[in-house]
Image: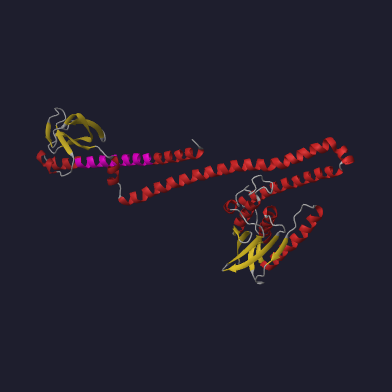
Amino acid sequence: MNRTARYFVCVVLIFLVLVVNFFYLARISLRDNQAKDLSLQANKIFELIKDGDFTKAYLNEADIDFVIYVPKSRRIIVTNNEAIPLFPLARGIQHSLIKNPDDNEKRISILYLTRAFALSNEKMVNIQVSMPAEKKLSEKIINFMPLSALNVLLPLLVILFLLISLYFFRLEKKYNSQKEFIANMSHELKTPIAVISGHADLLRRHWKKLLEKNESEFENSVSLISKESENMTKIVQNLLELTRLENRLTKLQKEKISVKDFFEEIKEEWTFSGESRAENSSLERSVHIEIEPCDENLVIFTDKNLLKQIFCIAIENSKKHAEAENLKITLQAEKSGRKSSLSIRDNGKGFSKEALSRGFERFYSGDKSHKKGSGIGLSLAKSIARVLGAKIRLENDGGAVLRAIVSSK
């Protein structure tokens, strides 16, 4: 049995325990009510016969059986059901099984109460009253309890069952997420560690030979160690940032921002950093950023640095996955009511169908080998958007599009 099935069984058992407790408490309450009823009927019968006229006992219209008898001789004075045996005096309501007059092999369950009374002529008599015990407890309880109470109690039990079920399923989901996180984290760190370890071992053993005969291979090993160290640092930093965001540890610094100036700032930073990286690495992919015309007065109210981080994640994602020969990024903005839609689009083939639905999942990467990225970036962007109170989604429109819906006020 898998964990989800076990959780469901636990939920069902808890629900059943609650239902059993409910009926048990209702049964106790019902018995108390029956005891009060029997005691009341015994007092009524006594009031009718206290002057010594026992025939008046038949005037009691309650649907109960009664026997009036002399205590010492146990002589029956009057009864309305001869099949009921005599019971001794006892404190409170009692339960007993008696023979069924219609079928000797069967028994009838009854509740009885026997009390001693002194008549007006000072003679003592025992008055015994009895009624059948409940045969169908559920029907008795439903008849006994007010309809309004049932209308409230039953929906509450159902809601409680659903809440407990939801709690256990969320617990299961968190457990699976944690298990998947550990597995993915191990996978993500395994690759750079293996590369660093392999090239470090190569340099340790043959560094003299490489420097003398194959300097390019020496430089390549050092470059790979540096690159994989940088990748590991990014993974750890992104995970720490995710943790801070999910635990609400990041303090927002919201302000009014001109969208046009915001886009210009992104373009300038990426143009400068792209040129700098290209000088240091021939493998670094260049990015050409264009800004579509937008309202110069368009203003949004948000944390600029965090919003910029979302756009930087989108650009990095395009650099890794867009298959266009000359990568072009287009920034666009438009106002819609109290919200503003800011989008970033590349000129690649767009997201796959799976990526559109799973792109924001932590450690999801369209590249199953994870050679193009760790799969943390878009998950981080989603967490940032949640903290900002913004919404982001993935689209395909002439390329891969990330759209952010941000408040204009």
Q: Vertical placement of 219 versus 384: above or below?
A: above
**Magenta highlight range:** 19-41
Question: In this rendering, would 72 be left or right of 211?
Answer: left
Residue 88 visible within the image? no
* Residue drawn at 62 percent across, 51 percent down: 379
* Residue drawn at 76 percent across, 61 percent down: 271
Image coordinates for residue 275, horizontal then vertical, percent: 79, 58
* Residue drawn at 79 percent across, 39 percent down: 200
36 in magenta = yes
Colouring: secondary structure
356 in magenta = no
* Residue drawn at 87 percent across, 37 percent down: 209
Q: For the C terminus, which image quadrant?
A: bottom right
Question: In this rendering, would 173 be left or right of 46?
Answer: right
Q: Nearer the viewer, residue 313 or 71?
A: 313
Image coordinates for residue 115, horizontal then vertical, percent: 21, 35
Residue 270 visible within the image? yes
Most common SS among magenta residues? helix
Q: How many marks?
A: 0
Image coordinates for residue 313, horizontal then vertical, percent: 67, 55
Q: Nearer the viewer, residue 400 or 18?
A: 400
Q: Nearer the viewer, residue 163 or 376?
A: 376
